Image (cartoon, grey):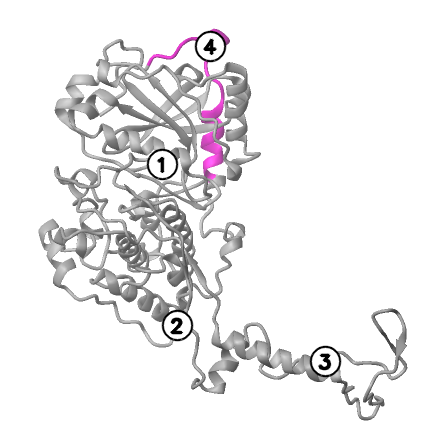
Amino acid sequence: MAMTTRCPEDDEYESSGSSSGTTTAAAAAATTTTGQNSSTNSRISDLSFSSSSSTASVRKPASVSITVGKPHKANQAAWEAMKLLRREKGTVGLDHFRLLRRVGSGDIGNVYLCQLRYPFFSTCLYAMKVVDREALVVRNKLQRAEMEKEILATLDHPFLPTLYAQFEASHYSCLVMEYCPGGDLHTVRQRQPNRRFSVSSAKFYAAEVLLALEYLHMMGVVYRDLKPENVLVREDGHIMLSDFDLSLKCDVVPKLLKPKPSTDEDSAEQQCEVADHAYSCALPMQPVISCFSVAKGVNGSRKNPKHITVITATTMSTTTTTTTTNTASSTTTTVKKLAKEPSPEVVVEPINARSKSFVGTHEYLAPEVISGMGHGSAVDWWTFGVFLYEMLYGRTPFRGDNNEKTLINIIKQPLSFQKIVAGCSDFDEMVRAQDLISKLLMKNPKKRIGFLKGSVEIKSHEFFRGVNWALIRSVRPPEVPSQLMSKSSSSRGKPQGNQVQRDAAYTVPAHFDYF
């Protein structure tokens, strides 16, 4: 069934009594749309960045530079251009950018495609998030914009936004991030056959999203708003999460989980199965000692080895010495020890995070969010299950005729899947996918996969078998929009106007609609 675009104004909401208060603003959205507040439009639509109208409570310095290094962006043109601009000009401000067009809007601001005003850097495109601080004060959402800056400034991950610069212009706050020309996964899904992804494509996107969520949890950020509309596609086809205005910031403490050692009553077969990961159950082949060799003592004197057996070409028997016997005994002891003591696991999951905020998108809300009893990081694994379900089946699992029925279905309706045709090429993969989704969409968060160990449990599921997590960026994505976007980017990237016009201070025209 075709999925209509979910309007954030209808689906994203937050209770006035939110206990978290640590949410972030939308990040570098390329195609998301939202309902607009008509009263706000009439009040500030005719203002430009150069307006002098600003309240004292929200006035900030004219520009603020970001000096934090971003190793994942090293040697990339957009990052190096910003570094060079900062070295030459000292600070980065609005007058250094040319706004080209609006590419998206969110609950607390709009996103514009922009480029540096200097011809040498004109091919570098950025996404500038513009937030009206005065409007956010009226709407009591200024804290979300402030938290966005704090979170984005700390992120350095291939599948998360990069904050190139931030500055203030009058009562506007501007965040310069990377631009994703490939749109979002909701739009990409609409172009697929039957408006759903193949299993291999869904696995690719789910794997990259999982790594992004893993990093966020390690940084103490619970995302809380995963959906295809918030997963953007970069020029190279890889993904980037966006829209952090509903995220929860919390503390996270790394833990070392030591599995319980096996007892002596365990069968030898189980011990051999564990030991197989490091050693073979059979004793390893011992080094062959030549019958012509002689051993040297500690002081260099030659000693005659004891119990040497001569090796012939026909028997190929191994030499048995006192040293060999001791080595075999030591190896056997090591194998048994490894079998009884599995390796500990390092888990960095904010399992103690708690919030009673009623936030999210209706079709993606976890049962514990709807109940209002409090939720933690497990909500991200619920939304991850709904996300995977929608990519594979083209719809969310609990969608009702309206928002109220959707919430009731999430609480009461059991999970169901479309019947898999036996013998189809992806039969086994779909079975594994359904098993993972079933474990992610457990209504009791304590029984949900990932509740205690986070992404460690999910990455080890059979559905992700064969995924090389360390080299996933080397895998060719299902769709690479670079060829299509390079033509439009090159035409938009050409410097416009003469040198005097390019160097002049920029003022946003009145028709630019901020909210």
- Which mark is nearer the camera, 3 or 4? 3
Are discs 2 and 4 less than 8 Å apart at CB? no
Q: Quadrant of residue 326?
A: bottom right
Q: Which residues are magenta?
A: 484-507
Residue 50 drawn above or below residue 12: above
Magenta span contains residue 500: yes
How packed mark 4 is, by other alpha carbons closer than 10 Å (few <14, some 14-19, many 20 or more), is few
Q: Secondary structure at mark 2?
A: helix
Q: For the residue marked with disc 1, what is the amino acid?
A: Ile
Give the structural element (helix, strand or loop) at label 1: helix
Could you tell me residue 84's position as x and y percent? 55, 22
Q: Which is more N-terminal, label 4 or label 3? A: 3
> Looking at the image, is mark 1 or mark 2 earlier in the sequence?
1
Tell me, for residue 503, which label it has, or none: 4
Outermost residue toward the front in this view: 299
Check disc 2 and report the residue beneath it: 428
Amino acid type of the residue that numbered disc 3 sits on in the rendered structure: Gln
Residue placed under numbered mark 3 in the picture: 286
Secondary element at tag 4: helix
The residue under the point 47% across, 82% down is 270
Left or right, residue 399 beside residue 306: left
